[in-house]
């Protein structure tokens, strides 16, 4: 199991808005390369994000499925990590002050060869990736709050 957390200078609702927009998944999840489709109703339990993982031309078609959701508090996902297996990823959002949210990301390997690694080895692989994912998620949530977009920053 790998766990990371970060403080975001925005509300839980803003962070959850990003999570609830499946099209942003590849913008904040390290390793996700391209979103092919987002099921209608995302992030209801059982809905999927159909995405590619890895660099072109070696990318793999995969899916991430919602296992549980309690807006704007938690989102639990089942992510396939082909060829490494699959993982359960839980995102917990809690108020840490006025317009400050603590986001915890807990990843637990469930299937495949990665599950056979000792927890310390899993953490060495997953913690840096998940810290970067939270950094990207925070950037998106704060940018949404301020009402600016990437194109606004490029002007």
Image (cartoon, rainbow, N blue to C red):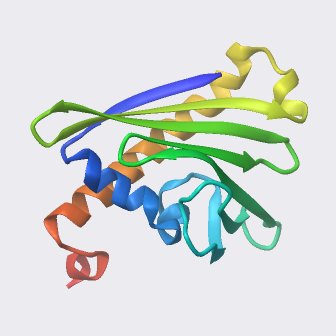
- Quadrant for the C terminus in the image: bottom left
Given residues 77 and 85, the one toward you in this image is 77
Instruction: Look at the picture and state if 116 lies above or below 146.
Output: above
Q: Is residue 77 above or below residue 126?
A: below
Identify the residue at horizontal 32%, vertical 51% (top origin).
Answer: 15
Residue 124 position in % (x across, y down): 64, 24
Residue 129 placement (x, y as % from top left): 56, 40
Left or right of 114: which side holds 78?
left
Q: Image point 78% across, 14% down: which residue? A: 118
Which sits in the foreground, 79 or 71? 71
Residue 150: x percent and y percent? 30, 75
Which image quadrant is residue 62 in? bottom right
Compared across the picture, whether 80 is left or right of 73 comes to: right
The residue furthest left is 98
| Image quadrant occupied by the N terminus | top right
In this rendering, would 8 be left or right of 59?
Answer: left
Asked which quadrant contains residue 154, the reply is: bottom left
Closer to the camera in the image, 101 or 68? 68
Residue visible at 69% across and 68% down in the picture? 51
Q: Quadrant of residue 146?
A: bottom left
Q: Position of residue 115 (x, y in %)?
A: 83, 26
Apparent side of residue 136 relative to residue 60 in the rendered image (left or right): left
Q: How many marks on residues?
A: 0
């Amino acid at each position: 199991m790998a766990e990371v957390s970060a403080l975001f200078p925005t509300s839980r609702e803003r962070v959850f808005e990003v999570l609830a927009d499946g099209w942003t998944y590849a913008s904040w999840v390290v390793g996700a390369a391209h979103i092919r489709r987002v099921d209608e109703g995302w992030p209801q339990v059982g809905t999927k994000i159909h995405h590619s993982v890895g660099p072109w031309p070696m990318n793999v078609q995969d899916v991430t499925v919602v296992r549980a959701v309690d807006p704007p508090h938690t989102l639990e996902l089942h992510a396939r990590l082909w060829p490494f297996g699959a993982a359960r990823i839980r995102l917990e959002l809690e108020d840490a002050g006025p317009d400050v949210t603590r986001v915890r990301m807990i990843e637990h390997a469930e299937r495949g060869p990665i599950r056979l690694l000792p927890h310390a080895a899993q953490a060495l692989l997953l913690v840096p990736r998940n810290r970067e994912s939270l950094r990207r998620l925070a950037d998106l949530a704060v940018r949404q709050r301020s009402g600016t977009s990437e194109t606004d920053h490029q002007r």
